[in-house]
Image (cartoon, rainbow, N blue to C red):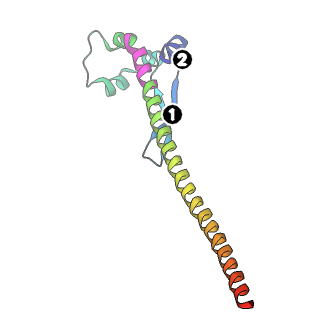
Amino acid sequence: MVAERVTLAKPGRLMIVSNSFKNMVTYETQVKHTVTQSEATTMDRTEWTKAMDVYSFEPSIYEVWEDLHEFYFGCVVYAAFLEAATTETAQRMTAMESATKNAGEMYNKVSLQFNRARQAKITTELCEIISGASAV
């Protein structure tokens, strides 16, 4: 659907900004230039041959581009969505791991405080019992 809208809009220039997954901790925001239909027709043949000499086209490359540019836009947009989804999942996993670690530390601190308070109360009661027994 996005590729169809882009194709219908016939942009003169198209840049896709997306997150690129690097590893579980980091990602990069990158800007990718995609070749539009108007750029392809105005581009000189030397630039085309740099990228397209590897392939052989029948009919000519310009006619093939007319047929495949919507597919090209779809692939570029889909790739950007996949990269963004991967990055988001990795960042969520990292955040949940940190939250779990912090909750564990907080639980240990509260447990230690509770045990100290319980031990202080027991010690106080023992002192009262011993004081009462020695007074008798």
Q: Secondary structure at mark 1?
A: strand
Amino acid type at image mark 2: Pro
The answer to whether 105 is drawn above or below residue 96 in the figure is below
Q: Which residue is mark 1?
A: 18
Q: Residue 80 location, x and y as percent?
A: 46, 30
Q: Look at 54% across and 17% down and name the residue there.
A: 11
Q: Name the residue nearer the viewer: 126 or 116.
A: 126
Q: Residue 125 location, x and y as percent?
A: 69, 77
Q: Look at 75% across and 90% down and name the residue there.
A: 135
Residue 103: give its label. none
In the rendered image, which quarter contains the C terminus?
bottom right
Q: Look at 50% across and 38% down and name the residue there.
A: 88
The answer to whether 81 is drawn above or below residue 94 in the figure is above
| Residue 110 as seen in the image, left or right of residue 74 | right
Q: Is residue 35 magenta?
A: no
Amino acid type at image mark 1: Ser
Q: Secondary structure at mark 2?
A: loop
Q: Residue 86 location, x and y as percent?
A: 45, 37
Q: Name the residue nearer the viewer: 120 or 25.
A: 120
The answer to whether 22 is drawn above or below residue 50 in the figure is below
How far separated are the C-alphas under marks 2 and 1?
Answer: 19 Å
Q: Which residues are magenta?
A: 67-77
In front: label 2 or label 1: 1
